[in-house]
Amino acid sequence: MDQLLKYEFEKIFPGCRLLDIHEYLMEKNVSLDQTGGKQYLYHDPCHTPMKTYNPVRVASSLMGQHVLQSDRCCGESGTLGTARPDIADQLRYRKLEELEQGLVTLTGRPDNNTGQVKLLTACPACQQGLSRYQDDTGLETEFIVVELCNHLLGADWQDAFTNRINSGDGIERVLL
């Protein structure tokens, strides 16, 4: 998103806006009514793709409940983990403390053995990095939009979508 914003699309397409998918869905009033008692922590990426609205507000609106922000970098940023593992490990240690504190706030326990809390993010690198905490915390990490789809479209939505695309149904083709 940071790179796209530098392209000045509004000069090419007057009136256009660049929005993260989550911001767009919030503007369209997409929201969950029920999450089966699930609570959420939100990890906002250091390079957040949400530039128009407050990311915690977006996550809370989409999930239909207050979502608690989990501060601190996950230590996954680009090649930091391979280029400077000494620094990345310190970041990960502090993030683990932050996740445990969030779990205590939501459940009274520093672990998620009950499975009632899920960790959300809007960044694929962060999702990969945050998945490294699952053994210590029990937190499963998911993209907000995927969590929405799981609840709104059912657990098999990805397979159904892939089958639909593979059958040629629903594909738009542009002919030049």
Image: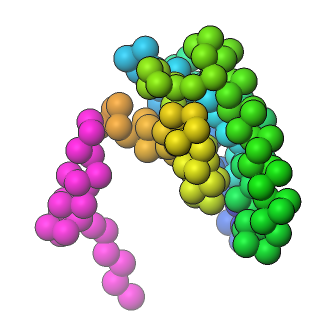
Residue 60 figure quarter: top right
Measuring from the top left, give residue 159's x and y in whole percent: 23, 54
Q: Is residue 34 magenta?
A: no
Horizontal side of residue 155 vs 50, given as left or right: left
The number of callouts visible is 0
Q: Residue at x 79, y 74 (%)?
A: 83
Residue 97 figure quarter: top right
Q: Residue furthest top?
A: 108
From which residue to which does the magenta span run? 154-176
**30 relative to 129, above or below:** above
Indicate the quadrant containing the N terminus: top left, top right, bottom left or bottom right. bottom right
Which is nearer the eye, 62 or 13?
62
Horizontal side of residue 149 vs 113, given as left or right: left
Q: Is residue 117 visible?
A: yes
Q: Residue at x 51, y 34 (%)?
A: 138
Q: Residue at x 68, y 24 (%)?
A: 102
Q: Is residue 122 visible?
A: no
Q: Residue furthest left?
A: 167
Measuring from the top left, give residue 17's x and y in whole percent: 68, 53
Horizontal side of residue 6 vs 55, given as left or right: right
Q: Residue at x 31, y 68 (%)?
A: 172
Which is nearer the eye, 23 or 14?
23
Measuring from the top left, give residue 45's x and y in whole percent: 72, 48
Horizontal side of residue 48 vs 119, given as left or right: right
Which coloring applies here? rainbow
Which is nearer the eye, 17 or 22?
22
Q: Is residue 164 magenta?
A: yes
Measuring from the top left, give residue 11's x and y in whole percent: 78, 68
Which is nearer the eye, 110 or 63?
110
